[in-house]
Every structure is written in structure tokens, then in C-alpha cells.
Image (tube, rainbow, N blue to C red):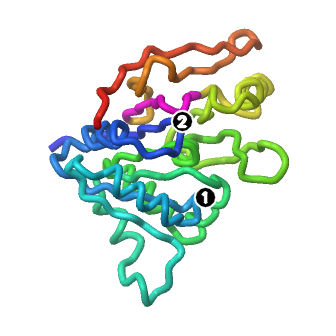
Amino acid sequence: MSEKPKQVFAYGSGRLTKEFLNYTKELTGKTKPKMCFLPTASGDNEGYIERWYEACEGLEIEAHVLRVWINSIDEQRSWGEMILPMDAIVVGGGNTLNMLAIWEAQGITKLLKQAYENGTVMTGGSAGSLCWFNAGTTDSRPIVYSIVTCLGFLNYSNCPHYHSEASRIPLYHENIKTGKLTEGFACDDRSGVHFVNGEFKKAVSLDVHNNSYFVSLNHGEVVEEKIQSEILPRIE
């Protein structure tokens, strides 16, 4: 029996859409996969969690949530019991730096790595995109965007919200040009990139106006390559 591929699907915005969730479902190869939402970056925001369940409606998904703001009386399962049986992990948007720090302190980082190695599909937008790469720029600190070191499942940098926030593009380019970030992938809010075993496979989008880009250096100059995207069918 062949091993499951290691897969990441990362997209620009932390907004939950049926189309991206259904694409994630297809990547699992299951008819009714177990998919767990991690809203850590939003402080386990209850409205966000409600939108998760709403987005899963009608998609034949067994929807779960992993909250970190809990106590031992409320939660009688270990983090491993919640993470390792999942077919897909969906990470929400919010404060990337705080999310990564909490995961590390709680031992969740190691479990996510184990799940990824076992073939659990890793996905998410905004902070939930950035976390899978080696590094990127984040608005998690006061005043200015800064660089955050991430989980490194993918040996590329990442920039979500690429055309949504005007300051992100020149900053991303400058950080790659100066060597502060490696070459990497940038995604508009409604576009995403899919990786298999650490290698880029394809880009998908919800419309023709949102795209993904590969940004690299060529003889000291930044090169931005727009990637042809598959437009996902709309789900009502």
C-alpha cells in the first residue's frame, strides 16, 4: 500500500468559502472526510466558528473544531486525539505570531507535523496560509509589517492578501530582493496554491480577477510570474 502524499492547500484570505472547502475535501479522497478547523489566530472567535459550520453545510464534511482557550474540565481529549484522526486541517486567519507561539507552547506544532507526514491535508488562508511556509510578512506586531518564521512544511516564503493590501507587494518584493525572504508564492484573497510532497502542483481561484504568483530573483532583480489558475465551480 502506497503512502499518502503530503499536501498543502494555501489561499490568500482567511474567509471560509464552500468552494475552497470542497476542493480540500476532494484532496482527501474521502466521501465524508473529517475536517478540523483551528481558529487559534482569531482567539477562537465564536462568530468565526459559527461561519465554519455554516460553510461546511451541504458539503458532506464531518466538521470539527480545535479550541485552545479551554480548561481541562471542558475538554477531555488530548490534542493528539483531536488532530491525528483528521483527514484535513483548516487553519483560520488572524494573528500569525500569536497562533504559532500558542501551538508551540501547547505541543500542537509537533502534532501538525506528524499529521502532515501521515497524509492529513493542511490548508487555510491568511495566517492559515502563511503558517505552512518557511517565512513571510505579518501584521501581528504593532506599527509595521514584520517577518515571521513559520512551520516550514514548504521551503518557500508566502504572501497572502497580495493585491488586497497595497503595501504588501513592494514589501514582499523588497524582502526577497534583500534576501530576508526566500523566493515564494503570493496569493490574492480568492486564489490559492496546492502543493504535493513539498512541490507546487497547481493554482486555483474563485474568479478570473484573483490570481497566484511565483516571486523570485533573476540576476538580482525581482521577477513576478502570474500562475495560470483553474477556476473552481461556484457552490451555492
Q: Nearer the viewer, mark 2 or mark 1?
A: 2
Residue 178 belongs to the span the image colors magenta: no
Q: Quadrant of residue 168?
A: top right
- Left or right: 217 as drawn, with respect to 144: left
User: Residue 100 shows which numbered tag?
Assistant: 1
Q: Name the residue under label 2.
A: 12
Residue at the farthest bottom position: 73
Image x and y of residue 63, in percent: 30, 59
The one of 29 and 212 positioned closer to us in this rendering: 212
The range drawn in magenta is 185-196
Secondary element type, mark 2:
loop
Instruction: Name which residue type carries label 1.
Output: Leu
Q: In this view, does 218 lie above or below 179?
A: above
Identify which residue is drawn at 42% across, 71% down.
79
Instruction: Name which residue type carries label 2.
Output: Gly
- For label 2, the crowd category at 10 Å Cα-Cα, with few meaning under 14, some 14 to 19 and many 20 or more, is many
Identify which residue is drawn at 56% across, 44% down.
152
Quarter holding the C terminus is top left
The overriding secondary structure of the stretch rendered in magenta is strand
Image x and y of residue 97, in percent: 67, 55
The one of 56 and 30 positioned closer to us in this rendering: 56
Quarter holding the N terminus is top left
Residue 195 belongs to the span the image colors magenta: yes
Image x and y of residue 218, in percent: 69, 11
- Left or right: 208 as drawn, with respect to 43: left
Identify which residue is drawn at 31% across, 55% down.
35
Image x and y of residue 193, in percent: 45, 30
